[in-house]
Amino acid sequence: MRLLKLLEAQSELSQSELAERLGVSLGRTNYHIRALIDKGLVKVDNFQRSDHKLGYLYLLTPAGIEAKFTLTRAYLRRKETEYQALRLEIERLRAELDLQPKRREAA
């Protein structure tokens, strides 16, 4: 999902730049980009970079945009569920502490 977001926002980033921003190896980044291309979620176009090296634009296809949306929705649901569980755990812990007799900490 993070890779799809980055590619959508900055399609001109090199694989090295993508790897750095994602905090993963260049090989792993290359692997995932190739997988996205193979699935038809990303297409690649050539362009000339300012330093006259051939570069690539990684463009999300309509299927890629839909996949990013679906992944984002699933991620949000999962995080909301985790958030609710954490809120309940915090409430239980606070209630447990409230039931405990107040103890003075040793100075």
Image (cartoon, grey):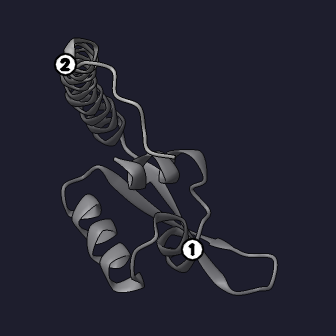
Give the residue displayed 33% in from the left and 47% down from the top: 1
Give the residue displayed 52% in from the left and 46% down from the top: 107
Check the image and report above or below for 101 versus 17: above
Where is residue 100, by image quadrant? top left
Three-letter code, disc 1: Ser
Mark identifier at residue 74: none
- The percent coordinates of residue 34 (x first, y second) are 28, 71
Nearest the viewer among 39 and 7 is 7
- The percent coordinates of residue 68 (x first, y second) are 33, 37
Residue at the spot of label 2: 96
- The percent coordinates of residue 99 (x first, y second) are 20, 12
Circle 2 SS class: helix
Please state the total of marks drawn on the protein image. Answer: 2
Dot 1 crowding, Cα within 10 Å, few <14, some 14–19, many 20+: some
Check the image and report above or below for 68 versus 15: above
Nearest the viewer among 98 and 16 is 98
Mark identifier at residue 14: 1
Is 94 left or right of 61, judged from the image as shown?
left
Circle 1 SS class: loop
Dot 2 crowding, Cα within 10 Å, few <14, some 14–19, many 20+: few
> Cα distance, mark 2 to mark 1?
52 Å
Is 55 left or right of 6, judged from the image as shown?
right
Nearest the viewer among 104 and 34 is 104
- The percent coordinates of residue 46 (x first, y second) are 56, 71
